[in-house]
Image (spheres, grey):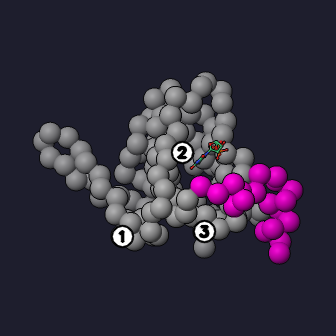
Amino acid sequence: MHLVNWINFPTLGDERGSLIALEAEKHIPFAIKRVYYIFNTKAGVARGFHAHKALKQVAVCVSGKCKMLLDNGHEKVEVWLDSPNKGLVLEDLTWREMHDFSEDCVLLVLASEHYDELDYIRNYEEFLKQVKT
Ligand code: TYD
């Protein structure tokens, strides 16, 4: 699997404006158990700096933009999340960091599991060890 996988969401709507609908197991490749959003991020703040053991997520920037760094232990790629019709797939065992949030950035994340701190790998060396096993 490639490190960077985008999902293009069909934009609905009409002369009044735009609308995007995301359906579990259709536009999103899993059953959604949790939705969260990151907003009001202060200037210069970076977030993330972790990987997950099993959690799968799709991130979509519904307003503004931010940069996402993805790292599978072999390769690192930085991409801009800057469009409400593009979802970035965040696989398990992928280190992610979010940088350069615009003031108006609202980053919506759809997750395959409920919140579980035990699923986090917050130490980069530990992440590299897990990738190798
Ligand atoms: P964290 O995942 O560390 O944020 P980020 O990776 O974006 O920098 O989460 C920040 C805090 O919020 C942490 O105390 C855990 C809590 N949290 C929840 O309670 N539920 C959730 O779904 C998420 C994503 C975080």
Quarter the N terminus occupies? bottom right
Q: Is mark 3 within 8 Å of ligand 1?
A: no
* Disc 3 from disc 1: Cα separation: 20 Å
Q: Which residues are magenta?
A: 115-133
* Disc 3 from disc 2: Cα separation: 17 Å
Residue 83 part of the magenta-drawn span: no
Quarter the C terminus occupies? bottom right
Left or right: where does residue 9 sit relative to residue 69? left
Seen from the viewer's position, the closer of residues 33 and 87 is 33
Task: Say whether marks 3 and 1 touch (CB < 8 Å).
Answer: no
Q: Residue at x 77, y 51 (%)?
A: 122
Three-letter amino acid code at disc 1?
Answer: Lys
Residue 128 part of the magenta-drawn span: yes
Q: Which residue is mark 1?
A: 26
Q: Residue at x 72, y 59 (%)?
A: 118
Q: Residues within 10 Å of mark 3 (few under 14, many from 20)?
A: few
Q: Which residue is mark 3?
A: 2
Q: Residues within 10 Å of mark 2 (few under 14, many from 20)?
A: some
